[in-house]
Amino acid sequence: MVKPTTAFLGSIYVGTDRLERVLTDTERRDLASLLRKHDFVGASLVSLRFAFTLRRNKPAAQDLQGRANVRLVRQGWDPGAVTLVKCLCRFVWSEHAHAKRESEAARRAEVAFLGEQAVHHADTAPSIEDLATRLETERQEDERTTKRIASVRAAFVKAGDTMNLLWLDYQLNGVDEPSEMARLSGHDVNEFYRATVRRKRHTAQLLAAEGGAQSEEKK
């Protein structure tokens, strides 16, 4: 993608990330004028209310909204593609999801157990109601993930599988590569590779147990 030389391409504000520089005074005034034209104050009130539904805390909601505004300046906005209020709410949601991934260690292990869930689609702007529903779903998934990780740890402890206990602890602390785990722990990297086979067996047993428990609940 060719780097633009000005902050605006027609009515599209391209953002400082694409410019790879800060805005000039003139560009800042032009951006402020564009935002006023599209009722930035009203859109900000809506995005703040949405941030509050996510955080349930006024200072935290204001911080989330502030980071969303920074995202707007950095990443740009096309008024012809999405309204300002939807753009701000989308950035609020994205920043909220990003903060959750950073603050919750269990989410860093989700790749190994549940996989990633997309938080929004580039070509469709979800409504605030849809995002609130998705938040509740994600909260429930977080609870299931935490319980599953506890079950996996218990299975490793019961089996005396110290290598997979090490693997799990490293995963929860953001270390994914077996070579790095080996370097940090002083173990041979092949021990971590051999642990993969046992880990798959433990996981299969847990999934089978979960399936049986769910069948009993339905009876």
Image (cartoon, rainbow, N blue to C red):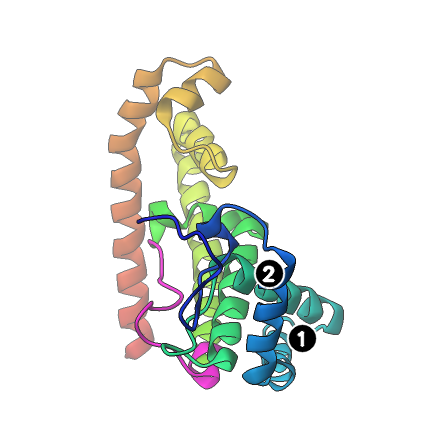
Name the chief secondary structure element in magenta: loop
Which residue matches tag 1? 56
User: Is residue 189 visible in the rendered structure shown here?
Assistant: yes
Which residue matches tag 2? 70
Q: Which residues are magenta?
A: 115-132
Residue type, mark 1 in image: Arg
Choose the circle earlier in sequence order: 2 or 1: 1
The verdict on residue 180 being magenta is no
> Who is closer to the viewer here, 207 or 9?
9
Q: Relative to residue 87, is residue 1 drawn left or right?
A: left
Residue type, mark 2 in image: Val
Q: Residue at x 60, y 60 (%)?
A: 70
Q: Relative to residue 196, is residue 41 drawn left or right?
A: right
Q: Relative to residue 161, is residue 202 drawn left or right?
A: left
Residue 193 x, y percent position in the rendering: 28, 24
Q: Residue at x 39, y 31 (%)?
A: 164
Position of 176 relative to 137 (above/below)? above
Residue 133 x, y percent position in the rendering: 45, 80
> Who is closer to the viewer here, 123 or 59?
123
Mark 2 nearby-residue class (10 Å; few <14, some 14–19, many ≥20): few
> Who is closer to the viewer here, 8 or 189?
8
Residue 190 x, y percent position in the rendering: 30, 17
Classify mark 2: helix, strand or loop: helix
Tally the marks: 2
Quadrant in the rendering for residue 192: top left
> Who is closer to the viewer here, 127 or 122?
122
Give the CA separation, mark 2 to mark 1. 21 Å
Position of 167 relative to 207 (above/below)? above
Q: Residue at x 67, y 75 (%)?
A: 56
Classify mark 1: helix, strand or loop: loop
The verdict on residue 130 being magenta is yes
